[in-house]
Image (cartoon, grey):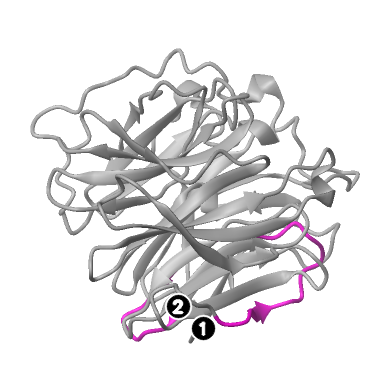
Amino acid sequence: MEVYREIGRYAGWPANYGIWSWGNEIVVCFTVGYMKEEISGFHPRDASRPFYTAQARSLDGGESWKVIPMVCKVPGNKSLSADEHVKSDLGIGDTADLENTPIDGPGIDFTNSDLAIMCARSGLSDGAESWFYFSLDRCHSWNGPFKLPGFGLRGIAARTDYLVFDQNTCIFFLTAAKSDGKEGRVFCAQTTDGGRTFDLQSMIGEEPDGFGIMPASLRLPDSRLLVAVRCRGNKPDFTQAQNWVDLYASDNQGVSWKYINRPVADTGVGGNPPTLTQLKDGRLAIVYGYRDQPTGMGSVTSMDNGQTWSQPIMLREDGGDHDIGYPRTVERPDGKLVTVYYYNDQPDGERYIAATIWQP
């Protein structure tokens, strides 16, 4: 199923933005630019032309979608979370016009039933800055941007991942630049005053030789926290590096973490981030893009809260090449999952946003 598709355009990376759902009402964000005339490189987008952020809404559980430009303020009125995909003069770069604006009044009520939070960033590595927005009307309007602290780290590359604990308390799961300035290492930061201030809660795992980025979290009924992390080994040529997904757990609300296992041993050349979802029947599901041939979207499930995982099952494996994935997943009231990702049917074809509705 297609969420957004237009000839000549490059639509991508929903995992960099977010997905939210209220029953059968679903909102997902992604970015749209232009294809490069000469198809080459890992992502054949035209870096000399701007990207803009789009927002798609479904009112029928992902069966149909309406797409509009993202209705939020972007620092410098440039591309949101896409600096690495455009020339420097089109990226946000130095966020000098991003004020560290305090949230007025009592702060965010994280228990608001219509709440959505979206995180964004200026880059991936040394010097990257990040901020967030929040909506109290199911993404019809957004407040922000509100700058996230640097936490004494070399750079913060935020994608959207958070867990709400009460009206004032929320943990954001983020990625930092490593001690050498390269991406990246995951950590969590907590606010207990409605988003007005944040404290670094903990780093998750040891600093990797390659990278550990793009966390996907959930809270189990027994209050244990789980985080799935996109990982890559260290090779001079990234196309030769191993890529996989690791799982960590915390039993003290993110103060400390322990390694559990490797739910996905291989996500293909370049790698792909996971989604992590707990189903109404208690099972866990991870979805990821698989970037080796045959390229497509894969999934694994767990019946014991992540202690063991099934063999991979492919949701589809008809991708034109490796330039696919970056999924987001929500569960519908009927128990089916809606996974949204970017895709292509052939290497020189447009990149589009697709949705798969499936029953684990």
Residue 80: x percent and y percent?
A: 52, 35
Relative to 37, is 298 on the left or the right? left
Sequence-first tag of 1 and 2: 2
Instruction: Specify the amino acid type for callout 2.
Output: Leu
Q: Position of residue 102 (x, y in %)?
A: 22, 23
Magenta span contains residue 302: no
- Report x, y in % for residue 133: 33, 38
In which quadrant is the N terminus drawn?
Answer: bottom right
Does residue 325 belong to the magenta stretch? yes
- Residue 6 visible to an observer of this rendering: no
Camera sees residue 162:
yes
Q: Which residues are magenta?
A: 310-337
Residue behind mark 1: 358
Q: Which residue has dot 2 on it?
A: 337
Q: Please state if 97 lies on the left or on the right of 157 as rendered.
A: left
Q: CA distance from mark 1 to mark 2?
A: 5 Å
Using the image as rendered, state which of residue 206 and residue 152 is in the foreground.
Answer: 206
Residue 105 placed where, x, y %?
9, 30
Under circle 2, the secondary element is: strand
